[in-house]
Amino acid sequence: MCFVSCLRKTKCNITPIRFNVVDTLQIKGDIVFENKLGNVDTLVLIDHYNILNEVTKKSLMTDIECGHSLGFDYDSSNGFGTISIGIKKDHKNEYTFSVNGFCISKEIKMSKKVAEKDSLITIDIEKCDKSKLKKIAFRKLKIEYFETQDGNIWKPIKFIPRSL
């Protein structure tokens, strides 16, 4: 009889996310952006994670799946807000790209083939009082540009590597 918790653990064969999907050296740091007017904004790295779960754990209170997760949290020096960007690979080799912040809460599921492609992912942001952003574009977890509600397009001009 099991009264408190019947924890089941299952070892799985998960391989880490490879650099052809996400090159963490290109995004683990501060990113300086500039718009066509010469204004500058810096996304300052405030946190990052790299978690590899090689065991699935299930019980009444726990449900942790095998997988590998990478993520980065940035804070805008111009007050645009905080943004969390992450990617997770599960035991089926399926990927989930996630973005939270700047009035965005989006998860995009993709196959390994799509995750490895060098394609642009663009997310439109509905007008929101908490954010000045209208659109944000990513390539392999790296922000390629963002557009503000006033039509300014901000592109990265400098990357400053950091470790926390």
Image (cartoon, rainbow, N blue to C red):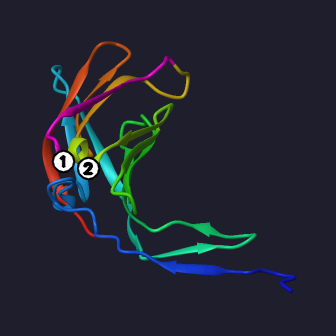
Q: Secondary structure at mark 1?
A: helix
Q: Secondary structure at mark 2?
A: helix
Camera-nearest residue between 142 and 20: 20
**Outermost residue toward the bottom in this view:** 1
At label 2, the amino acid type is Lys
Q: Are marks 2 and 1 in contact (CB under 8 Å)?
A: yes
Residue under pointer 2: 112
Q: Is residue 144 above or below residue 148?
A: below
Which of the 4 image quadrants contains residue 114? top left
Crowd around label 1: few <14 · some 14–19 · many ≥20 (10 Å) = some
Q: Is residue 97 left or right of residue 158?
A: right
Residue 44: x and y in percent read 32, 52
Q: Is residue 59 visible?
A: yes
**Outermost residue toward the top in this view:** 150
**Which residue corresponds to the image point at 42% horizontal and 75% vertical from the top-left?**
12
The magenta segment: 117-127
